Amino acid sequence: METILKPLAKRIIDLAHIGFDCGFFSNPVGNFSVIPHGEYYLASFRAFGYYITTETQNYVFTTNMVLAHPDEHIFCLLDRDFSFIKRLPIAENTYWKDPKFNKRTPYLEDLRMVEWDGSIYGISSVFYQNETSYERFGMEVQKIAVDGEAVRCSHFWNSIEHGMYGRMKNLMPIPDKPYRYISATYQSGATMIDISNDRITEGGICEGEMYRGNSPLLKTDWGYMTITHRLTADERNRKRYINYIVEYNADLSVRWISRPFKLTESNIEFATALLELPSGEIAIGCTEMDDTPMLMVFDRDEFLDEVII
């Protein structure tokens, strides 16, 4: 069995209360992104209108279907110790609308934020749908501005608008390369998408195992690091996520891939936040069962020692 890292964390910061702090008392918040913003952290939590049954691991929808309230994401400010300060309402939220699938408001999920050229950008998986089902999947990039006491999310780029389709939870913004993303974590390399000119550059792609969702890239001395997961099944054929660290060299070639590990004991977990704290510690934002967000803080060397090949 894989090592479970949660017991090894120096401290665990429970963020499941954020939904209540923001005034939502019946629906959970889920996968989240966090980024330094001045003397605080700007955080975005996925807003849910459903829960997952522990027994079957299936999604059970509320009467509001996916959207429990008007915002797909909840933005808030966190202090440097990650304590809640206040919610930031969304004053503007624009995105590309697919003319072929416009019968329902598209659903954006699992926002991940990055700072480029002094501005914050967010990437979300976007689902376009008709009255009964999801029909088209892509990626929406929005520019995010904290305007006084509110947040403004304005459309910047959309993959479908530029002829690129498919589920895109494995896209990672490159922190020191503005408007560039790594797409797909293969064992041998990555594909880079340059949204400033819609160019796709293949780098080291070959046959190999593709992993699913990724954390944002963390800049390192040798290149970049991310946490990714692979979807498997347990003995009862329920979904089970297995995690890996993938390190890239500066040219985006793979430096190494860790042995598999679990962050928690839950089958479903997704590391959507990864950052280095001023103390030099590594913080991993993880959500159990899609609705119990937490931040795990590790000593950097001890963490890497546990997962190195």
Image (tube, rainbow, N blue to C red):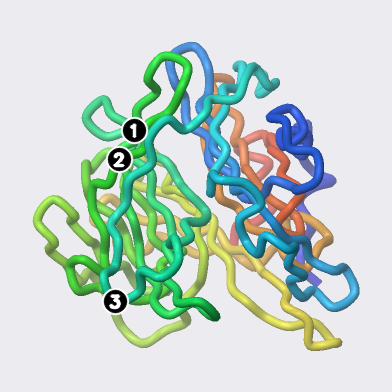
Element assignment for label 2: strand
Q: Where is residue 218 in the image (x, y as percent from the top left)?
A: 44, 42
Q: How far apart are labels 1 and 2 at the CA level?
A: 11 Å
Residue bearing the label numbered 2: 154
- Mark in the foreground, 1 or 2: 2
| Residue 293 visible, this orientation | yes
Which of the marked residues, 3 or 2, is nearer the chain's N terminus?
A: 3
The amino acid type of the residue labelled 1 equals Ile
Q: Residue at x 76, y 48 (%)?
A: 27
Which of the marked residues, 1 or 3, is nearer the chain's N terminus?
A: 3
Residue bearing the label numbered 3: 100
In the image, residue 188 sits, relative to residue 306, either above or below, namely: below
The amino acid type of the residue labelled 3 equals Lys
Element assignment for label 3: loop
Q: Residue at x 85, y 87 (%)?
A: 236
| Label placed on residue 120 | 1
